[in-house]
């Protein structure tokens, strides 16, 4: 349906059917319009800017990727850009400004109204991955001594320019945050009641320097609509809304998946070949080193392999299954760390549970592999060897899959970063060592 609509939209532009163009645009979400514009020519973008309203331009600009934002601003003069920014929340303005060249960014900031410029410059001073970097300064904060009637008047006045209206932040006379009030409670209370009487003083806050992933975990754990960002004096700097938290969760999940693969960080969707090679090659080189280490382990047992050729085709089963088992443990561990459920100091003893899981998995899979190899090779001893090696390697895989990300986290490294490389090294090297070492011990019964 959406594809047909986009095709019709392109057709209406090409045939200069501007009436149909506007009708189609009216039924589309801003994110879908941004997707459409990002893959089409400047001429189509110019037509869109010419025949649609500034309100829609602002909504599309908020949803656009970096490349489209730059293209849109290129076809607008400063006054039009400032007008668009005036209709956007400050955090979205900051995100957009962050993509612009420094000179252009400074010129635009200078044109922004002075009262808005302060909050925009403040937001630009925080790391983009911090609470301060993702917060918005558009919220409703009222004094606790106001009556419900006075509060409603303030909400009517401030409400149209705020991002969140259903949650009101309550301040004392020193402008310190003391709690929140739900709009539903305000609307259902007597007009002469003081705000302080319906204020919920149990409130979670974060500092602007806190990492966005920790903020997302707090919002998710306590099922919050928004979370307040305060300074050391408990003065309210801004709030982080649940829609921004969803973006953080998606972003962090993508980063973790990339890091588990040894790529790391965010990737540009339109990067050059050299860019992608540069991002991927470091961990591949480390992996090459661990591969040589595994190969060296095999060379220690060349005489054993030369006497029992069946070992050469069987040993990869042990390392492969160990790697798969370790990745299962690694995935669960990284997820638990991200959710704040695991910590090295508190939960290191859980490694014994993981060892027992590895031993049991190794026994089950090793038994099946041993039976198959017994019938294939005709020697029950090789079945026993792979059974014991599988138990040992899966126990090792569980230990490394559990401990490596916890240790990385303990030393302030991202637990997803490169964990799979260390895990693969352990299961390859020790898998070969267990299997071929046992084969050398039982060699008289194999030849």
Image (spheres, rainbow, N blue to C red):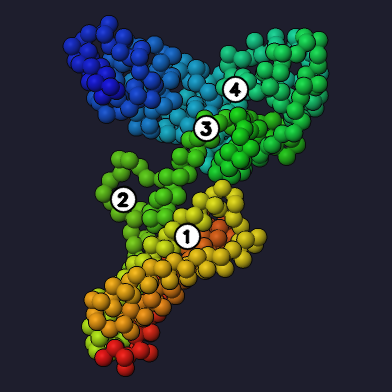
Which residue, given by chain and number where applicable, does mark 3 sit on? 244
Q: Is residue 358 above or below residue 265?
A: below
Q: Position of residue 212 (x, y in %)?
A: 56, 41
**Marks 2 and 3: in contact by CB < 8 Å?**
no
The crowd level at tag 2 (other Cα within 10 Å; few <14, some 14-19, many 20+) is some
The crowd level at tag 1 (other Cα within 10 Å; few <14, some 14-19, many 20+) is many
Distance from Cα at disc 4 to Cα at disc 2: 40 Å
Which residue, given by chain and number where applicable, does mark 2 sit on? 276
Helix, strand or loop under label 3: helix
Distance from Cα at disc 1 to Cα at disc 4: 40 Å
Q: Position of residue 273 (x, y in %)?
A: 26, 49
Helix, strand or loop under label 1: helix
Front in this rendered view, residue 273 or 180 = 180
Which residue, given by chain and number where applicable, does mark 1 sit on? 329
Which residue, given by chain and number where applicable, does mark 4 sit on? 164
Q: Earlier in the sequence, mark 4 or mark 2?
A: 4
**Marks 2 and 1: in contact by CB < 8 Å?**
no
Q: Residue at x 71, y 16 (%)?
A: 186
Q: Residue at x 18, y 11 (%)?
A: 15
User: Can you say which quadrant of the picture contains the C terminus?
Assistant: bottom left
Q: Is residue 143 visible?
A: yes
Q: Given the current orientation, which residue lies at the most extreme left position?
A: 15
Q: Position of residue 313 (x, y in %)?
A: 25, 75
Q: Earlier in the sequence, mark 3 or mark 1?
A: 3
Q: Residue at x 34, y 62 (%)?
A: 284
């Amino acid at each position: 349906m959406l594809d047909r609509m986009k095709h019709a939209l392109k057709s209406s532009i090409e045939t200069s059917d501007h009436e149909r163009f506007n009708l189609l645009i009216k039924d589309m979400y801003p994110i879908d319009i941004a997707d459409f514009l990002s893959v089409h020519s400047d001429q189509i973008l110019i037509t869109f800017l010419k025949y649609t309203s500034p309100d829609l331009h602002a909504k599309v600009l908020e949803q656009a990727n970096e490349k489209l934002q730059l293209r849109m601003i290129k076809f607008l003069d400063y006054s039009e850009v400032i007008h668009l920014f005036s209709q956007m929340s400050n955090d979205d303005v900051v995100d957009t400004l962050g993509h612009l060249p420094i000179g252009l960014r400074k010129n635009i900031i200078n044109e922004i109204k002075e009262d808005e410029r302060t909050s925009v410059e403040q937001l630009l001073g925080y790391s983009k991955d911090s609470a301060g970097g993702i917060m918005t300064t558009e919220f409703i904060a009222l004094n606790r001594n106001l009556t419900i009637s006075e509060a409603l008047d303030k909400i009517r006045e401030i409400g149209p320019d705020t991002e969140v209206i259903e949650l009101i932040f309550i301040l004392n006379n020193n402008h310190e945050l003391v709690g929140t009030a739900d709009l539903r409670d305000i609307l259902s209370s007597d007009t002469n009641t003081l705000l302080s009487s319906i204020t919920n003083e149990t409130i979670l806050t974060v500092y602007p320097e806190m990492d966005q992933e920790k903020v997302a975990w707090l919002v998710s754990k306590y099922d919050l609509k928004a979370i307040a960002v305060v300074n050391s004096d408990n003065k309210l700097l801004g709030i982080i809304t649940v829609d921004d938290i969803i973006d953080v969760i998606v972003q962090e999940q993508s980063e973790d998946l990339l890091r588990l693969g040894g790529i790391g960080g965010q990737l540009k969707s339109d990067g050059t070949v050299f860019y992608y090679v540069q991002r991927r090659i470091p961990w591949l080189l480390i992996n090459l080193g661990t591969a040589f280490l595994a190969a060296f382990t095999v060379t220690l047992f060349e005489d054993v392999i030369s006497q029992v050729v069946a070992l050469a085709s069987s040993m990869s089963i042990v390392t492969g299954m160990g790697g798969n088992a370790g990745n299962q443990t690694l995935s669960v561990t990284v997820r638990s760390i991200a959710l704040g459920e695991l910590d090295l100091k508190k939960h290191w003893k859980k490694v014994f549970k993981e060892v027992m899981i590895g031993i049991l998995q190794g026994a089950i899979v090793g038994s099946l592999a041993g039976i198959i190899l017994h019938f294939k090779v005709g020697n029950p001893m090789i079945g026993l060897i792979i059974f014991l090696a599988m138990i040992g390697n899966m126990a090792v895989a569980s230990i490394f899959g559990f401990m490596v990300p916890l240790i990385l986290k303990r030393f302030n490294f991202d637990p997803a970063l490169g964990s799979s490389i260390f895990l693969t090294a352990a299961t390859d090297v020790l898998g070969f060592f267990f299997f071929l070492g046992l084969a050398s011990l039982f060699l008289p019964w194999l030849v």
